[in-house]
Image (cartoon, rainbow, N blue to C red):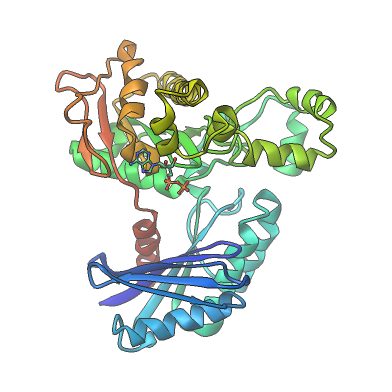
Amino acid sequence: MSKTIAINAGSSSLKWKLYNMPEEEVLASGIVERIGLNDSIFTIKYNDGEKYNQVVDIDNHEVAVEMLLELLTELNIIEDFNEITGVGHRVVAGGEIFKDSALVTDEVIDQIESLSEFAPLHNPANATGIRVFKKILPHITSVAVFDTSFHQTMPKVNYLYSIPLEYYEKHNARKYGAHGTSHKYVAQRTAEILDKPIEELKIITCHLGNGASITAVDGGKSVDTSMGFTPLSGVTMGTRSGDIDPSLLPFLMEKERIETIDDMIYILNNESGLKGLSGISNDMRDLEDAEDSNERAELSLRIFEDRVRKYIGSYAATMNGVDAIVFTAGIGENALETRQNIIDGLTFLGASVDEEKNNVRGKERIISNDDSEVKVLIVPTDEEIMIARDVIKFSDQ
Ligand code: ADP
């Protein structure tokens, strides 16, 4: 039995989940927030419901990991940190270098850092997480798992933008997508639930959280996805605009006296989407609460549903058919009305949702009517277990 830890390191946070593998038993999970700021918050969930909370100043990721390992022993979650034999790290951008997960070497860390221009907020933090674990636990199997690698199977027809081809050839300017680990997990689970070989299925996976993306999975492979060069494109999101006409940028910069393109992109990333449309909140629950009394909240919900529906229709065309539509992540797993409204507009595809089966949050379930030609499912995502499984794959080699 080996204990494996899945890590998601952000610039000021460290999320983790500890497993007994290959049993896939979750021993504990937690998050360290506000690393490098005052009053960092350490939260651990363990023993099926026990919770540990501490507010303490944590200067950097190295201190966070040292504290974490000490606490795991203090709380008797493990006896000794040598029991941890593997660590898997989520990395946001893998560019065209990483078509699959990779065993961490110094060269791999350098490559992850060299890809920082594709994910300036994330890759440097991911690399820091990897280095810190390598320093503290140098002998364990360490694996990097990339958000983009599942989408590396996209054909050129779908990943190229219609701009001068030289820009791709010279600068790798193309679509990379994101949320790949989640799309892969829910597509594989869908095949298992439907008891069909994934090679025979055309699946559209809808990862609808604060960030949202839709993927066309044909025969188990990602063939197109709604996020692009960065996670800004695609459907309307919590605070991100999704697709817009790029000519709007100089027009708005002039009218609104927005000085730099970075400021404009910041607005598209942080002040747009459901937040910008509603003027209330980026959170779906707030909009659902306000929907009946606030026209902007109502409008933003309808726009969100429309954009998701349009991508589903477009990906049915990309694959020339669809067998299953799958909802996952915060909104996909929990927002009943959103799911219902999206599918209600897709009767032309032969998809329909059973209102009673749809009346559920966060549970794995088929929610389509028995006579629906397209199966509709909720599959709660689990990116961490995919990371832990990849660590085991490398440990076994
Ligand atoms: P991310 O990981 O991208 O930050 P999540 O996957 O956690 O996002 O999803 C967050 C979104 O899920 C928010 O818009 C939130 O309102 C929505 N959500 C969570 N629970 C519910 C619920 N019970 N009903 C409706 N929406 C929900």
The N terminus sits in image quarter = bottom left
Residue 337 is situated, as x and y percent measured from the top left of the image, at 32, 27
Residue 258 is situated, as x and y percent measured from the top left of the image, at 81, 35
**In this rendering, is residue 206 above or below 10?**
above
Residue 9 is situated, as x and y percent measured from the top left of the image, at 53, 64
Viewer-closest of 164 and 344:
344
The quarter of the picture where residue 335 lies is top left
Viewer-closest of 286 and 120:
286
Quick one: which residue is furthest to the left in this view? 370
Res 173 visible: no
The quarter of the picture where residue 394 lies is bottom left
**In this rendering, is residue 96 above or below 125?**
above
**In this rendering, is residue 128 above or below 275?**
below
Say whether residue 163 is left or right of residue 63: right
Say whether residue 235 is left or right of residue 170: left
Res 15 visible: yes
**Residue under the image location 43 percent in, 37 percent down:** 286
**Residue under the image location 14 percent in, 22 percent down:** 370
How many labels sit on residues? 0
The C terminus sits in image quarter = bottom left
Say whether residue 297 is left or right of residue 176: left
Residue 228 is situated, as x and y percent measured from the top left of the image, at 59, 36
Quick one: which residue is furthest to the top in this view? 348
The quarter of the picture where residue 172 lies is top right
Find ligand 1 in the image and state its quadrant. top left
